[in-house]
Amino acid sequence: MRIGPHILSQIERCSWQYKLDWIDHLTGMPNNRNFVVGSVCDQLVVSWFKRGCERGWMQKHAEKCFEYYLEKNPVQWMAISKATLSKENVRTDRELLRQRVFEYVPKIEQVFLRYEIAGNKNIQPQRYGLTPFPNYPQHEMAGTADFFDHEKRVVLELKVTKSAEWLDKDQLLFYAALFTALDKARVNRLAFIAPLMQHPIVELPFDYADVRSLLKRCLGAVQLIESGQFKPAGKTRICYGCKFRGPECPAWAVRAVDTSTQHYGMRPVKY
């Protein structure tokens, strides 16, 4: 089993959700529409790097990349009103996300060029790492950082957000631990590239004590998987964002939930 930043967060939040998702392989709901813009921008930037960071390339191919992503990934669209989600709602939400991609792409290109990230031969896009856990060879740490600066030993992660609230330090700490194990060399710095924020390069305080703490949490997650002692989350509020609300979860049936509003806002739909 592979442990990544998302899986670690999922296990710590609700280990029963992890069991349904990764062990029982239940399908659940489609992808959350909130991740569409960030995923499309990630794909565009990586492709842009592979093509030599030509100016204007991302704007030219944004539409094609957006449509390709929606074709390959089912999306859970937002209900614009309290009425039943309709085709018009889907078209409206789809157009909103498309506009955001076209709005954000020039800002991303501007930041990458201004801070000399684009065209830097020392910065490798999509650095993938994989290493087994000591004493648990059947489990592995796995992760893909958006960028890695080999010369300065800096982990860089692109975040399409306007709020620092969504900058998760654990994600970068995970990559730091992974790349240190792979390269036998220390990572020196962690930073987010957030083109939509006032200060687009957000460098985080970094101490290897934090990495060691994260490794202990990863080991705890592996031991939990080995024990099979999965339990639902203790906090009811986590259930509202869960894609396995129903008979699959033993806790869902006994929790007091307003059935008239529990699905409002995000509903699976196929058109």
Image (cartoon, rainbow, N blue to C red):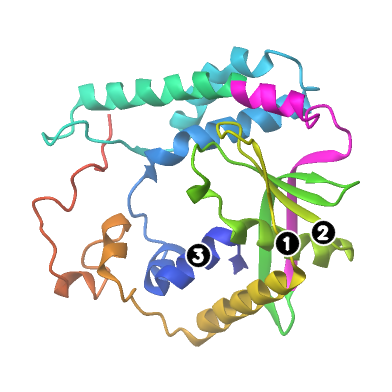
Quadrant containing the C terminus is top left
In the rendered image, the vertical position of residue 49 relative to residue 24, given as above or below: above
In the rendered image, the vertical position of residue 186 relative to residue 202, given as above or below: below
- Residue 103 at x, y = what percent? 50, 20
User: Left or right: where does residue 175 sit relative to residue 268?
Assistant: right
- Residue 92 at x, y = what percent? 28, 22
The image quadrant of residue 156 is: top right
In this picture, which residue range is highlighted in magenta?
A: 107-132
For marks 2 and 3, give the one nearer the viewer.
2
**What residue sits right under mark 3 in the picture?**
9
The image quadrant of residue 24 is: bottom left
Q: Residue at x 43, y 85 (%)?
A: 229
**What residue sits right under mark 2 in the picture?**
187
Choose between 269 and 194: the one closer to the eye. 194
Choose between 249 and 100: the one closer to the eye. 100
Can residue 229 be spotted in the picture?
yes
Q: Residue at x 79, y 60 (%)?
A: 179
Could you say whether the residue bearing mark 1 is in a helix, strand or loop?
Answer: loop
| Residue 206 badge | 1
Label 3 crowd (10 A; few <14 / some 14-19 / many >=20):
some
Q: Residue at x 42, y 69 (%)?
A: 13
For marks 1 and 3, give the one nearer the viewer.
1
Q: Amino acid at mark 3?
A: Ser
Earlier in the chain: of badge 2 and badge 3, it is 3
Q: Amino acid at mark 2?
A: Val
For marks 1 and 2, give the one nearer the viewer.
1
**Is residue 215 on the magenta stretch?**
no
Q: Are marks 1 and 3 in contact (CB under 8 Å)?
A: no
In the rendered image, the vertical position of residue 109 relative to residue 191, given as above or below: above
Label 2 crowd (10 A; few <14 / some 14-19 / many >=20):
many
Q: Are marks 1 and 2 in contact (CB under 8 Å)?
A: yes
The image quadrant of residue 121 is: top right
